């Protein structure tokens, strides 16, 4: 176990009164309070959940768009121009950009935001850089909580950029209303090898760097793939056929089309009741995850106090006890769990 | 399980062409387990706005071809305006007149790092850690 | 890359076969081989035999392994006339002039430090009185980065590390009464864009004084590597467009200012940023090759463009590697121009060099040691026949130089020239088994790296790909670690340290009142010029960028209309859009 880093953060420390009083400020639009709460979520500071509880009733208004794709396809650059277009349409924007934590040092270089600095003085754009801190799937553990905060802060639309580590980063679809998958020219083979799972979750495809050779080819391949899938899909589904959009994020081209697509998709989701369904699924995932986390944390705290857990670990390792029996033993002792 | 990570916003003045020091120091801080938000070339006001959104513990500036005092004054003033001056730790390094060092400290920089002894990896890291520890209420 | 084959492939084909006349006779080599083996076993200690080859670690070094000693066996294949030749003759390994420094000694170009236009005018006049025939213009940071002194970004930077020169009026003040038709000026405009903006200002200043452009001599850098790879900045234009501006400048200058050196392929700055001498050469040559290709595709022949291409190297700590660098570079560039581009004029096969001794190798600690370091760097460069030299000053890690620190720098060169007698003999290190071996090694390695860059599609595409950025980043990180661990020794820093306090050194500092003066001055320029004319020139510039016309003719019109540097920068960005380099961490 790593030791807690030597860090003090006045507002986050459980002080005289448990409440940090951040929620109220956030609801009044206080950016600094929101920023602080984001830290607390990441650092799992005690009392954070109290704040989130207070905010929760005010969330659910923001539309969440997840953007994923391999490293360097231009996710951040695309988001930069996407923000510009959304702002032109009068929407307020929250952005969560995620980069990997170094598994060796625990540190991270967060560079996505550098591509979006043009918006740094716009009070209606809130950008937050996040490190994965060991979390898998291209997200960080804190992402959902962060979305809630931005939502409660009143952001109309929240964009989430995942770590760019290639395929399989589809976790983001579980926390977003719409999932945008970004590719770049030369990704022809990638399309060929694309796992079914990706097509399943992609609502919109973007082929970025369309100023380069080969973009149209990737688009064609994708469309072919989408077409054959739609034939294969059962007719009972009110299928949304993912759009494929060509963009040149650096040259600010094709972005309106992306925005339109996102809106069109939203209308589709709303009209078909799919949005409700998705959000319900999301609530389920979040609830289950929260349970899982709380149980784990609770048990960990309780068992690690008197080395009970270590004892059992040793026994499992030496084959004195099997892990299944050991687990039920612990669970039996600690149910029912009283959660804070 | 909770792990409080130190978050640092690193920037260089808007026109600065020297990035080597900024890259080197950013790498050092990452290797010390910190989360480093890279901003590259920026104006003081925008560095502050970013630090606010990122709720950064530290703002680090690397400068080689201008007055650190002029940049520093604007930076601290903007931080004051945005109400993050107290909670933030300011550090600066690079090449500038030695006379500026005491002035920068007086202005409120927790660490000033011209090249040479006293600006090694461990010096910078312990400066940050100590400054954070001293802000921590007991 | 427009050619189907890379330079390496072309050279391998064209230089294959042909009769070689070996320098060493095979019988002698056999004897040496036998004796060497015996010597190794009998005379050389076991430990040294085991470590026959050692990898040297030094700042900015390539780490080419060194054997305990070298014999003809290491260069057994050498053909004297083909590989080494005579001074001033092909393949120019030994230098581009037959009489080298006996004909003309290396140009000594002191950098004048920083200051306002008026101060710089005085400094230059002083240097001329002292007998200088060549001068340098070091720009302040806003001017380098193409910002007007009165833009908010410039605050805190005006006149700190050079002179602000962002409109023709500035140039008139700075060069007042200086005989620019008699003095050669190295105008350190590193980038294609700031060359396109600033050189025309110099020309318009000459025009207003009635000095014809064909009387002007000097140089600019005009290098895409600087603009899109080496510098940090808020804004960049895409590499392809930057490359085009570079070539537009060349075309314009070649036609309109016939005696002017229109490009200095800048290895120096890339090297100082953090790379080896090999990459330094490979990148500079890759750019040179892309330029010649582009100019040929514009309908000029290789001699037309090749004649005035110059190179700019850093000379750093690894003495023999640096010696080899210049010799290898001359031979390789000759081959490229002759065999790849079919140049006929020997002048266009010449690799001319300006050398500045490495600044990144100099330390803040015990700064006097820097005089010694720089003297070795300078000696290496003179031993290889550089055309022009600037020795970095011992206050390198403190400030731009002052008159006090410039003196030992100039003296270093004068001392080498007047006292050491090394300039009497042309290419004095030739024929050393080691020197010829390492020269071959360097050439081979440069050609390999050049090949990699060409396979990425030439200089602009290689820069756009971000791979060169990453290469630099890796070098910086590795080198820093090696210094920290002591693998690389730096005297006064990690070995043989003293506890002496830092000496007092006179440094260049910001003067707030200058910023205010500049604001007022630029306001006046904008208030008094014909603004309609200015904006129509700017519109024409944007249009020229978009339509592929030679942009430098349009920046010239802007300069004539008193358009400022920042205004022209914005026009370029408007026309080309922006580009971002990749992350380097
Ligand atoms: C490398 C270098 C360059 C490279 C920069 C490449 C790049 N992208 O970074 C190149 C060659 C391009 C360059 C160019 C120029 N340079 Co230069 N350059 C240097 C050099 C040799 C080293 C600086 C460096 O990067 N060191 C590496 C770092 C890692 O080491 P360090 O500085 O010791 O860093 C330590 C501390 O400073 C501190 N630190 C630094 N930053 C930070 C930040 C934080 C938050 C913290 C905590 C600590 C910290 O910690 C570090 C680790 O110990 C210095 C001279 C020297 N020897 O120092 C001149 C120097 C900085 N350059 C100088 C100048 C003027 C220029 C030019 C502007 C000249 C001109 N007028 O054209 C040009 C501009 C070129 C252009 N068009 O862009 C001057 C500045 C003078 C002044 N302030 O009075 C110097 C001092 C040289 C001189 N004596 O004239 N340069
Ligand atoms: N030519 C071209 N380059 C682009 C385009 N979009 C982005 N880039 C470049 O691609 C590189 C990577 O862009 P980013 O936006 O950082 O990519 P990313 O997907 O966010 O990268 P990671 O977050 O590191 O995974 C940068 O150099 C961009 O300038 C585009 O449309 N055309
Ligand atoms: Mg990104």
Image: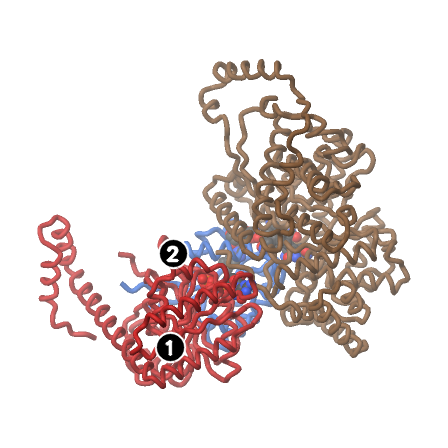
Chain B image colour: blue
What color scheme is it? Answer: by chain
Label 1 belongs to which residue? A240
Left or right of C519 in this view: C62: left
Q: Position of residue A149 (x, y in %)?
A: 36, 78
Q: Which chain is red?
A: A
Q: Residue at x 77, y 52 (%)?
A: C300
Q: Secondary structure at mark 2?
A: loop
Query: Depth check: C295 or B133 in front?
Result: C295
Residue placed most toward the observer, B57 or C530: C530
Marks 2 and 1 belong to one chain: yes
CB of mark 1 near ligand 2 (< 8 Å): no
- Residue closer to the observer: A284 or A247: A247
Residue A316 vertical placement versus C22 (above, below): below
Q: Which mark is residue A102?
A: 2
Q: Which chain does the residue under circle 2 lie in?
A: A
Compute the Cα span from label 2 to label 1: 38 Å
Q: Which chain is brown?
A: C
């Amino acid at each position: 176990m790593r030791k807690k880093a030597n860090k003090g953060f006045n507002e986050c420390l459980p002080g005289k009164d448990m409440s940090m009083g951040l929620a109220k400020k956030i609801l009044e639009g206080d950016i600094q309070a929101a920023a602080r709460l984001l830290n607390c979520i990441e650092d799992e500071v005690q009392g954070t959940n109290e704040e989130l509880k207070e905010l929760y009733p005010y969330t659910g208004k923001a539309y969440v768009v997840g953007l994923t794709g391999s490293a360097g396809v231009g996710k951040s650059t695309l988001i930069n121009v996407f923000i510009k277009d959304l702002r032109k349409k009068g929407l307020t924007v929250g952005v969560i950009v995620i980069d990997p934590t170094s598994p060796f040092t625990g540190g991270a270089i967060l560079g996505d935001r550098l591509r979006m600095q043009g918006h740094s003085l716009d009070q209606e754009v809130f950008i937050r850089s996040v490190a994965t801190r060991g979390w898998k799937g291209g997200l960080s553990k804190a992402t959902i909580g962060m979305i809630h905060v931005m939502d409660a802060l009143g952001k109309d639309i929240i964009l989430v950029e995942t770590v760019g580590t290639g395929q399989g980063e589809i976790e983001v679809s579980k926390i977003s209303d719409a999932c945008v998958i970004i590719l770049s020219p030369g990704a022809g083979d990638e399309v060929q090898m694309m796992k079914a799972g990706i097509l399943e979750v992609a609502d919109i495809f973007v082929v970025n760097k369309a100023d380069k050779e080969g973009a149209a080819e990737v688009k064609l391949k994708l469309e072919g793939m989408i077409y054959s899938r739609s034939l294969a899909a059962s007719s009972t589904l009110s299928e949304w056929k993912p759009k494929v959009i060509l963009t040149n994020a650096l040259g600010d081209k094709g972005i309106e089309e992306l925005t339109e697509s996102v809106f069109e998709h939203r209308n589709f989701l709303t009209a078909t009741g799919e949005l409700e369904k998705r959000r319900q699924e999301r609530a389920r995932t979040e609830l289950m995850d929260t349970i899982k986390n709380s149980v784990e944390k609770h048990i960990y705290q309780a068992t690690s106090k008197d080395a009970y857990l270590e004892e059992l670990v040793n026994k499992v390792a030496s084959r004195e006890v099997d892990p299944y029996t050991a687990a039920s033993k612990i669970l039996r002792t600690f149910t029912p769990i009283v959660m804070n | 399980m909770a792990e409080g990570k130190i978050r640092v916003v690193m920037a260089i003045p808007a026109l600065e062409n020297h990035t080597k020091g900024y890259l080197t120091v950013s790498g050092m801080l990452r290797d010390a387990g910190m989360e480093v938000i890279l901003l590259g070339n920026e104006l003081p006001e925008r560095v502050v706005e970013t630090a606010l959104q990122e709720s950064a513990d530290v703002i680090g500036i690397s400068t080689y071809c201008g007055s650190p005092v002029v940049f520093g004054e604007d930076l601290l003033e903007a931080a004051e305006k945005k109400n993050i001056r107290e909670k933030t730790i300011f550090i600066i390094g690079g090449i500038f007149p030695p006379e500026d060092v005491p002035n920068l400290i007086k202005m409120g920089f927790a660490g000033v790092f011209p090249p040479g002894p006293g600006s090694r990896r461990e010096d910078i890291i312990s400066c940050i850690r100590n400054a954070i520890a001293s802000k921590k209420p007991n | 890359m427009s050619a189907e084959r890379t330079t390496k492939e072309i050279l391998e084909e064209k230089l294959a076969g042909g009769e070689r006349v070996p320098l060493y006779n095979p019988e002698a080599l056999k004897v040496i081989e036998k004796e060497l083996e015996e010597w190794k076993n009998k005379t050389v200690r076991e430990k040294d035999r085991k470590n026959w080859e050692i990898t040297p670690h030094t700042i900015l070094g390539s780490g080419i392994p060194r054997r305990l000693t070298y014999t003809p066996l290491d260069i057994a294949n050498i053909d004297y006339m083909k590989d080494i030749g005579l001074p001033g003759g092909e393949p120019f390994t030994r230098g581009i002039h037959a009489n080298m420094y006996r004909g003309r000694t290396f140009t000594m170009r002191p950098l004048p430090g920083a200051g306002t236009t008026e101060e710089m005018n005085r400094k230059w006049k002083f240097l001329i009185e002292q007998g200088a025939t060549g001068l340098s213009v070091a720009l302040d940071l806003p001017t380098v980065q193409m910002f007007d002194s009165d833009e908010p970004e410039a605050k805190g930077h005006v006149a700190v590390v050079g002179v602000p020169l962002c409109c023709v009026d500035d140039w008139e003040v700075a060069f007042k009464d200086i005989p620019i038709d008699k003095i050669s000026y190295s105008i350190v405009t590193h980038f294609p864009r700031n060359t396109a903006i600033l050189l025309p200002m110099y020309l318009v200043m000459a025009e207003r004084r009635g000095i014809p452009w064909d009387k002007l001599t000097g140089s600019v850098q005009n290098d895409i590597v600087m603009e899109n790879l080496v510098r940090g900045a808020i804004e960049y234009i895409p590499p392809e467009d930057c490359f085009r501006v570079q070539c537009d400048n060349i075309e314009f200058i070649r036609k309109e200012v016939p005696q002017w050196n229109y490009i200095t392929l800048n290895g120096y700055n890339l090297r100082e940023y953090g790379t080896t001498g090999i990459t330094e050469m490979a990148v500079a040559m890759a750019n040179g090759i892309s330029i010649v290709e582009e100019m040929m595709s514009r309908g000029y022949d290789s001699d037309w463009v090749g004649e005035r291409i110059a190179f700019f190297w850093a000379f750093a700590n690894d003495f023999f590697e640096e010696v080899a660098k210049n010799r290898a570079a001359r031979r390789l560039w000759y081959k490229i121009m002759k065999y790849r581009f079919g140049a006929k004029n020997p002048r266009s096969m010449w690799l001319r060099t300006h050398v500045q001794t490495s600044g990144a190798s100099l330390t803040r600690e015990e700064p006097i040691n820097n005089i010694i370091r720089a003297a070795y760097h300078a000696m290496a460069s003179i031993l290889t026949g550089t055309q022009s030299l600037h020795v970095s000053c011992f206050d390198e890690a403190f400030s731009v130089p002052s008159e006090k620190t410039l003196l030992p720098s100039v003296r270093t060169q004068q001392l080498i020239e007047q006292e050491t007698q090394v300039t009497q003999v042309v290419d004095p290190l030739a024929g050393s088994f080691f020197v010829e071996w390492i020269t071959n090694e360097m050439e081979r390695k440069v050609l390999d790296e050049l090949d990699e860059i060409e396979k990425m599609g030439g200089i602009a595409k290689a820069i756009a790909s971000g791979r060169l950025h990453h290469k630099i980043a890796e070098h910086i990180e590795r080198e820093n670690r090696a210094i920290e661990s002591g693998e690389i020794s730096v005297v006064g820093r990690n070995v043989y340290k003293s506890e002496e306090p830092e000496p007092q050194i006179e440094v260049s500092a910001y003067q707030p009142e200058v910023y205010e003066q500049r604001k007022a001055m630029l306001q006046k320029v904008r208030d008094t010029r014909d603004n309609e004319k200015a904006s129509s020139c700017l519109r024409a510039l944007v249009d020229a960028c978009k339509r592929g016309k030679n942009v430098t003719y349009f920046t010239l019109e802007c300069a004539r209309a008193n358009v400022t540097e920042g205004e022209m920068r914005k026009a370029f960005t408007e026309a080309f859009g922006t580009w971002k380099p990749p992350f380097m961490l």
